[in-house]
Image (cartoon, rainbow, N blue to C red):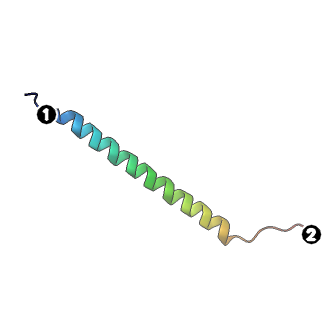
Amino acid sequence: MAKPNYSFEKRQKELAKKKKKEEKRLKKLEKSTVGDEAEQPPLTEG
């Protein structure tokens, strides 16, 4: 029977964690960008 490759499992877990963190960061950045646009009234030339 083959022995388990713990380093591979650890690497996969780290990659998943990193991916999730990056997605969360992008979602937060997108939310703040959309929020900023909604708060500012549109500029009118006149």
Q: Residue beneath label 1, please?
A: 4
**Vertical arrangement, residue 35 with respect to residue 4, above or below:** below
Residue 40 placement (x, y as % from top left):
70, 70
Q: Amino acid at mark 2?
A: Gly
Q: Quadrant of residue 12?
A: top left
Q: Which residue is most to the top? A: 2
Up the image or down, 2 lies above or below 13; here it is above
**What quarter of the picture does the N terminus occupy?**
top left
Q: Position of residue 6 (x, y in %)?
A: 17, 36
- The amino acid type of the residue labelled 1 equals Pro
Q: Position of residue 24 (x, y in %)?
A: 44, 55
SS label for mark 2: loop
Q: Residue at x 56, y 58 (%)?
A: 30
Is residue 1 found left or right of 30 in the rendered image?
Answer: left
Task: Name which residue lies at 66% across and 69% down.
Answer: 38
Mark 2 Cα-neighbour bin, 10 Å: few <14, some 14–19, many ≥20: few
**Secondary structure state at the residue bearing disc 1:** loop
First of labels 1, 2 by sequence position: 1
Q: Residue placed farthest to the front in the image?
A: 1
Looking at the image, do the residues carrying marks 1 and 2 touch, with CB atoms under 8 Å apart? no
Relative depth, front residue between 46 and 5:
5
Residue position for label 2: 46
